[in-house]
Amino acid sequence: MDEQTKVSEGCSTTSFPLLWGVKKNTVDVSTRNVLNDARKMMCEWNPVAKVYDPLKAGSIDGTDVEPHDKAVWRAMLSRYRPNKGVTGDPHLTLFVARLNPQTSEEKLQEVFSKFGDVRRVRLVRDIVTGFSKRYAFVEYKEERSVKRAWRDANKLVVDQYELFVDFELERTLQGWIPRRFGGGHGGQKESGQLRFGGRDRPFRKPINLTSMMPQNRSADRWEGASARDAVQEQDREHGRWRERERGDDRGYHKDKRDHKRQRDRSRERDSNRREDRRRRDAHRDYE
């Protein structure tokens, strides 16, 4: 059973008995909205994006409500259109990345021909230098060959480099934004611009708030407890804020005392020096 089937089955009313048992006008609206939003989010969740959304792609679980880096903003504001000059059937084409810079079209043809009849191999090169950009597109003649290569060629080592293989997304995924515009999938951790929802980095499942509801209590009691917990958490947060304020005050007064003590010591040293100098001068005059 795949992940999507599990999610669909988890959206039945039996999976959320307390939500459906809530009586009208017995709980506050905000709590009810939070629980219903959580249920909707869990029903619609999928590890791989069906429609590309730059905001969701920038979130590890697809729940961000505001961009966390400038590249996400750039992707949201861009109006990208697929290249009309690209030929071939997008549903029979694979995207192959992380190639060795020395890997050639002939080598790719040899490797991917093991999974079926290849119609075309296009290695993307720099238009100025002619060097490989380390990714390519492989088009097959049959759908079963595409699926076989997608399943078996991913992480295959070619010329000492581990490949990444996925379906072409530019012409098949609605709303697709490439990496150069701040979108894409995957990425390196060091860049701080990871993109989720693809094969390389699928979405993580969000926390199911309804799963934390006690099953041996009525909905009304649980909702009331939720409201009380929210108030208690607010009180605890206020207490932590007051502690921080007191800590800042204590630190301020301590610094002030230390500064006064250091100033008094400096004055005492200056006074002792003046007294010693006066005694030496008096002794010199006496002689």
Image (cartoon, grey):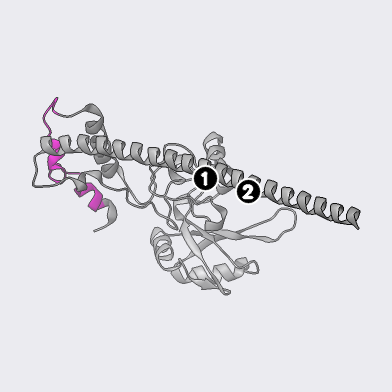
- Asked whether residue 140 is drawn in magenta, I would say no
Q: Specify the quadrant of the image occupied by residue 134.
A: bottom right
Give the Cα distance between marks 2 and 1.
12 Å
Q: Which amino acid is tagged 2?
A: Gln
Q: Residue at x 23, y 33 (%)?
A: 31
Q: Residue at x 26, y 43 (%)?
A: 43
Q: Is residue 201 left or right of residue 236?
A: right
Q: Quadrant of the N terminus?
A: bottom left
Percent across and percent down for residue 78 are: 56, 36
Q: Which amino acid is tagged 1?
A: Lys
Q: Residue at x 23, y 35 (%)?
A: 36
Q: Nearer the viewer, mark 2 or mark 1?
A: 2
Of labels 2 and 1, earlier in sequence is 1
- Residue 148 visible somewhere in the drawing: yes
Residue extent of the magenta highlight: 5-26
**Residue placed under numbered mark 2 in the picture:** 262
- Asked whether residue 11 is drawn in magenta, I would say yes
- Helix, strand or loop under label 1: helix
Percent across and percent down for residue 11 are: 20, 44
Percent across and percent down for residue 274 are: 78, 49
